[in-house]
């Protein structure tokens, strides 16, 4: 049991680079990406539910998931792009560029889906199913690469240094 209320000092600090687009150090991009991740990964199950049941309800669900996935993805990407260009060290990591390219590909796929489904949400077979399958794949790729940035390289997190833990030999900012 701890004997004092002092903040414990970890033996090893992970690399951690503070997000520049954050509210009280809470990075905004990771908060916002949950919306496109959820919408665009539920698109394929919803398309398959439509093909299985032939119920127009599922075609309309797919339409809204695709539209909301695109809108929230574009919004989230703005904050990611800001962090990418405001954190110099982030741009030295190849994962940031891979994540950026994969993110743009995912948003292009989402835009393609809106175009395919506009006016005729029930025209799901075959191209919209191909599009929603590729979306699911790309959500995995983009999420994996984003996770590499955050959890692997510590990009866009709180940015703790040894100084935050009261250590004397804190590295300079
Ligand atoms: C296309 C432009 C994008 C850029 C330049 C970009 C950039 C970044 C950066 C710099 C980070 C590190 C955390 C931070 O600094 O905020 C990050 C993390 C992440 N990004 Fe993106 N991003 C983009 C689009 C997207 C999209 C469209 C998605 C999802 C649909 C996404 C999903 C993620 C995820 C899941 C993380 C890890 C966050 C976590 O797991 O908490 N990003 N991104």
Image (spheres, rainbow, N blue to C red):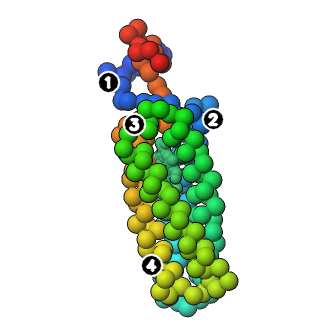
**Position in image of residue 49 (x %, y %):** 51, 82
| Disc with the residue nearer the chain's start (4 vs 2) | 2
Q: Nearer the viewer, residue 88 or 32?
A: 88
Q: Quadrant of residue 67?
A: bottom right
Q: Can you identify the residue that label 3 sits on?
A: 92
Residue 119 vertical placement versus 6 (above, below)? below
**Position in image of residue 44 (x %, y %):** 48, 75
| Disc with the residue nearer the chain's start (3 vs 1) | 1
Q: Residue at x 60, y 36 (%)?
A: 22
Label 2 environment density (alpha carbons within 10 Å; few <14, some 14–19, many ≥20) = few
As measured in the structure, the alpha-carbon distance from the residue carrying label 4 to the one carrying label 1 is: 46 Å
Using the image, tell me which numbered label, if any, was put on residue 33: none
Give SS at disc 2: strand
Give SS at disc 1: loop
Residue 56 vertical placement versus 45 (above, below)? below
Pointer 3 and pointer 2: residues touching (CB < 8 Å)? no
Q: Can you identify the residue that label 4 sits on?
A: 130
Q: Nearer the viewer, residue 134 or 65?
A: 134
Q: Can you identify the residue that label 2 sits on?
A: 23
| Disc with the residue nearer the chain's start (4 vs 3) | 3
Pointer 4 and pointer 3: residues touching (CB < 8 Å)? no
For the N terminus, the quadrant is: top left
Looking at the image, residue 53 sits to the left or right of residue 148; the answer is: right
Which label lies toward us, 3 or 1? 3
Which label lies toward us, 4 or 3? 3
Residue 165 vertical placement versus 14 (above, below)? above
Q: Can you identify the residue that label 1 sits on?
A: 12
The reply to whether residue 7 is in sight is: no
Residue, far left: 11
Q: Residue at x 45, y 55 (%)?
A: 101
């Amino acid at each position: 049991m701890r004997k004092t209320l002092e903040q414990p000092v970890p033996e090893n600090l992970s690399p951690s680079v503070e997000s520049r687009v954050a509210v009280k150090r809470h990075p905004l991009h990771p908060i916002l990406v949950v919306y496109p991740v959820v919408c665009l990964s539920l698109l394929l199950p919803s398309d398959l539910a439509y093909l299985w049941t032939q119920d127009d309800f599922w075609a309309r669900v797919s339409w809204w998931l695709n539209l909301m996935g695109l809108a929230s993805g574009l919004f989230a990407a703005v904050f990611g792009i800001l962090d990418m260009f405001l954190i110099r060290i982030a741009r030295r990591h190849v994962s940031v560029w891979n994540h950026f390219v994969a993110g743009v590909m995912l948003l292009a796929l989402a835009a393609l889906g809106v175009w395919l489904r506009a006016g005729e949400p029930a025209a799901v077979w075959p191209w919209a199913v191909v599009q929603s399958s590729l979306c699911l794949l790309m959500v995995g790729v983009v999420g994996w690469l984003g996770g590499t940035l955050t959890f692997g390289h510590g990009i866009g997190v709180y940015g703790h240094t040894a100084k935050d833990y009261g250590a004397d030999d804190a590295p300079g900012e």
